[in-house]
């Protein structure tokens, strides 16, 4: 049997004109109300919640329908579960489904409209659920979002969600738009991964972006985080990243390693700092630090040190544009005396030069 569309939203419409004629909007609404969907053949046509989400950067698997007689693959149409009216039914492949919707009310004029679609395979091996909603209240908050989740008989489970919200900060009434997404999946054998993202935009000009990812495959575990923050004036920015991983060895010993960096700039001045580290199975540790100081006047100081006492050195290269000789180069090398810096400190200084010199680089 055909599946009915959900009722079209009610709203203002033009009254019938002379001779009983109707406006185009009235004709379109009547046509949509009378239309029915053709019988669905596969869960692919209903939802994508029946399978785990893809990791970021991985090409999503194409939705295809395989003909049982010819074996030919054809592209599946976009899922139509959200367009179904409330009710229940069964697809040609044995998938059962149930659709519900409703409206909730709360304090401060809170209003939320939601739809829920859930179902499972004929043999009960897979169960899934998908939800959509939009909400608002008297404070000006508006939100829309969706969530998918599911599990199967093999012990696999997954969840995926996203939200977009417009709100006003309680302290200064700054309008803020927040966008967040979340993916998680776990396999029956213990492997697992999770990813989170967020973007927050303020009407004042402030912007914050972040991501947090981690995964586990057998004895290997890895983590990755990064963030970016921009001020309201557009001339200051902070960026950072942090990555680390660990491996559990057969004798319950652990190997760990990672790297991270942080930079902060404003009005042409700022700093960059980084670190690389590792911990061996026997507890031996290694760390190496590096940094840059940008003075804002074409001077850059670079420095670094490590737990192994790496020798220090200072090197600066400046390019000078000499009149009538575009290929002329002048190299300035400055080495500091060995007894000035502590052992294990590596420093690299860009020597200041007159403004009539050309671009300079430091190594």
Image (cartoon, rainbow, N blue to C red):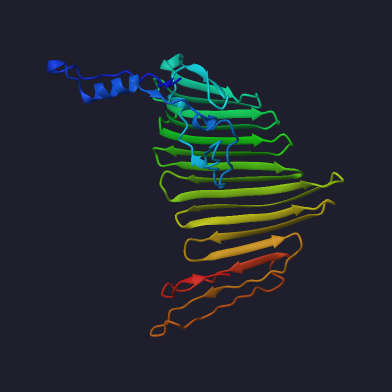
Q: Position of residue 91 (x, y in %)?
A: 53, 24
- In-front residue for pair 214/42: 42
233 displayed left or right of 52:
left
Answer with the quarter of the image where residue 34 lies: top left
Quarter of the rendering occupied by the C terminus: bottom right
Above or below, comparing residue 233 to residue 295 in the picture: above
Q: Position of residue 112 (x, y in %)?
A: 45, 19
- In-front residue for pair 325/16: 16
Above or below, comparing residue 67 to residue 136 in the picture: below
* Residue at (75% x, 43% y) in the render: 218
Q: Position of residue 41 (x, y in %)?
A: 51, 29
* Residue at (55% x, 43% y) in the render: 61
194 displayed left or right of 75:
right
- In-front residue for pair 287/304: 287
302 displayed left or right of 267:
right
160 displayed left or right of 26:
right
- Residue farthest to the front, as pictured: 69
- Residue farthest to the left, as pictured: 18
Above or below, comparing residue 35 to residue 211 in the picture: above
* Residue at (26% x, 19% y) in the render: 12
* Residue at (49% x, 76% y) in the render: 319
- In-front residue for pair 220/34: 34
Q: Is residue 336 visible?
A: yes
């Amino acid at each position: 049997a055909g599946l009915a569309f959900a009722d079209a939203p009610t709203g203002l419409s033009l009254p019938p004109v002379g001779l009983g004629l109707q406006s185009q909007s009235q004709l379109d609404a009547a046509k949509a109300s009378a239309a029915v969907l053709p019988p669905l053949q596969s869960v692919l046509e209903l939802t994508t919640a029946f399978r785990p989400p893809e990791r970021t950067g991985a090409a999503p698997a194409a939705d295809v329908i395989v003909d049982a007689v010819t074996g030919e693959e054809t592209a599946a149409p976009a899922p139509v579960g959200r367009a179904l009216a409330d009710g229940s039914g069964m697809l040609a492949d044995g998938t059962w489904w149930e659709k519900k919707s409703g409206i909730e009310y709360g304090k401060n004029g809170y209003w939320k409209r939601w739809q829920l679609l859930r179902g499972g395979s004929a043999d009960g091996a897979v169960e899934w659920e998908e939800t959509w909603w939009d909400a608002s209240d008297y404070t000006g908050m508006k939100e829309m979002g969706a969530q998918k989740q599911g599990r199967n008989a093999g012990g696999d489970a997954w969840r995926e969600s996203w939200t977009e919200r417009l709100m006003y900060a309680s302290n200064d009434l700054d309008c803020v738009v927040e966008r967040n997404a979340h993916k998680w999946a776990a396999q029956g054998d213990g492997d697992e991964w999770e990813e989170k993202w967020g973007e927050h935009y303020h009407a004042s000009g402030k912007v914050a972006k972040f991501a947090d990812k981690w995964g586990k495959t057998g004895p290997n575990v890895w983590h990755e985080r990064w963030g970016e923050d921009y001020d309201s004036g557009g001339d200051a920015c902070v960026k950072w990243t942090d990555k680390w991983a660990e491996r559990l060895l057969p004798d319950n010993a652990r190997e760990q390693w990672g790297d991270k960096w942080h930079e902060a700039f404003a009005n042409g001045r700022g700093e960059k700092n980084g670190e690389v580290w590792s911990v061996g199975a026997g507890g031996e540790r290694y760390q190496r630090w590096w940094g840059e100081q940008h003075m804002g006047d074409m001077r850059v100081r670079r420095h670094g040190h490590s737990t192994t006492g790496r020798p220090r050195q200072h090197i600066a290269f400046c390019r000078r544009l000499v009149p009538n000789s575009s290929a002329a180069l002048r190299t300035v090398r400055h080495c500091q005396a060995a007894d000035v810096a502590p052992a294990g400190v590596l420093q690299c200084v860009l020597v200041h030069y007159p403004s009539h010199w050309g671009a300079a680089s430091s190594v």
